Image: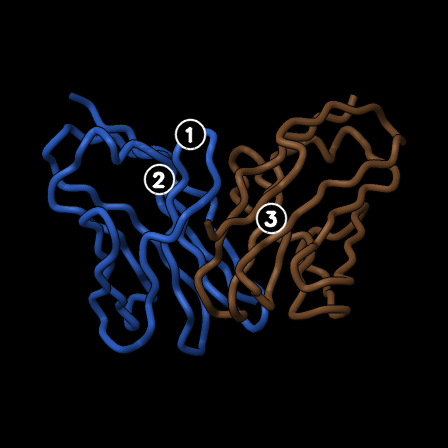
Chain colours: A blue, B brown
Amino acid sequence: AQSVTQLGSHVSVSEGALVLLRCNYSSSVPPYLFWYVQYPNQGLQLLLKYTSAATLVKGINGFEAEFKKSETSFHLTKPSAHMSDAAEYFCAAYGGQKLVFGKGTKLTVNP
Amino acid sequence: EAQVTQNPRYLITVTGKKLTVTCSQNMNHEYMSWYRQDPGLGLRQIYYSMNVEVTDKGDVPEGYKVSRKEKRNFPLILESPSPNQTSLYFCASSFGRYEKLFFGSGTQLSVL
């Protein structure tokens, strides 16, 4: 069964610093991978999706993620954090018919 | 506006009192799903539906029921709620199984 592991339940960065949120998946078949963001008191919205067309996927708000099959990873990055990036981020992957979410990483951005 | 609408936004109830959380989407999506979100556990799928009259269990279906009589609606039914079902619930929909999910705003349920 597919599983998704997000390393670090809380990440804190300074405004302008690099954001790196880690995600590893377990699957022997090419997965369908997603990053979603949840702002306070809102539902989740899609940041980006891996489609197998390219290993580097660009998403909204300056985020991108790199698919590394050899490491079974799909880490999310942003070169320069903004205060508005403070939110909870979820990595998700399809294993068969079910979409499995990681436990989430809460990002804090300090001024 | 394309959206997934859940109601109610907040609900406080007592153990054993049947309740229904409604979910409706206006995007003609075939795939709909229910998740619960608990601190430290992320989102876990309760039930999903590939199309009208087609539903299947997710990872945590116990204590829940769903129905998909119309394409746009996918209500979640708790026939006898218990305190361990206190959680934040999200409905989501998409054009297909592997497509982008559109989420509702959530329903915060407290079962006393």
**Are labels 1 and 3 on one chain?**
no
Secondary structure beneath dot 2 equals: loop
User: Which residue is tagged 3?
Assistant: B91
Q: CA distance from mark 1 to mark 3?
A: 17 Å
Circles 1 and 3, Cβ within 8 Å, touching? The answer is no
Position above or below: A64 against B106: below
State the residue at coordinates (39%, 35%). Answer: A39
* Chain label for disc 1: A
Front residue of A1/B38: it is B38
User: Which residue is tagged 2?
Assistant: A8
Crowding at dot 2, Cα within 10 Å, few <14 / some 14-19 / many 20+, comes out as some
Amino acid type of the residue that numbered disc 3 sits on in the rendered structure: Cys
State the residue at coordinates (51%, 68%). Answer: B95
B72 left or right of A25 in image: right
Q: CA distance from mark 1 to mark 2?
A: 19 Å
State the residue at coordinates (40%, 77%). Answer: A30
Q: CA distance from mark 2 to mark 3?
A: 26 Å
